[in-house]
Image (cartoon, rainbow, N blue to C red):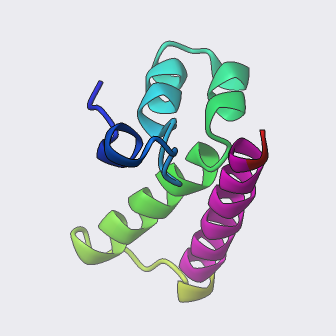
Amino acid sequence: MLPCLNKQLLGVDCPGCGMQRSLDLLLHGEFVAAFHMYPAIYTILPLFAAVIGTKVFNLKIDNRSIIGLGVASVVLILINYLIKFIN
């Protein structure tokens, strides 16, 4: 796994800390553990797929869906970060 420079230099987790481990858990079929590690993984992956599908493959995906996934991802990332920061 790639090290988090923010954590190494400042000693504080960044909002993205846990995403790599969560993706690894997801690829190994540990869905609940992936959610506990980084809840936004379940909104980020469809968001990336929708953006790539729209831009690269010219699929017709409603912009409201992309915006909704983006907002949900940001909210989950911030909530997860605040919970980690408090604990």
Which image quarter is the N terminus in?
top left
- On the image, the x and y values in percent for residue 52 come to 31, 65
Residue at point 61% right, 68% down?
74
Task: Judge whether 24 appears above or below 66 on screen.
Answer: above
Q: Is residue 58 left or right of residue 84?
A: left
Q: Nearer the viewer, residue 24 or 27?
A: 24
Residue 10 pos. (x, y %): 40, 48
Residue 32 lies in what quarter of the image? top right
Q: Nearer the viewer, residue 59 or 46?
A: 46
Q: Was residue 1 drawn as part of the magenta stretch in this picture?
A: no
Q: Is residue 29 left or right of residue 39?
A: left
Task: Judge from the rendering whether residue 13 lies leftward or rightward of residue 73; answer left or right.
Answer: left
Q: Measured along the vertical axis of the image, is residue 67 above or below residue 36? A: below
Residue 73: % across, % down: 62, 63
Q: Quadrant of residue 31?
A: top right
**Observer-nearest of 45 and 19:** 19
Residue at 43 percent across and 80 percent down: it is 60
**Magenta stretch, residue numbers:** 65-85
Does residue 69 lie above or below 27 as drawn? Answer: below
Residue 54 falls in image quadrant: bottom left
- At x 26%, y 31%, the residue is 2
Above or below, 64 relative to 19: below
**Residue sitting farthest toward the bottom:** 63
Q: Quadrant of the C terminus?
A: top right
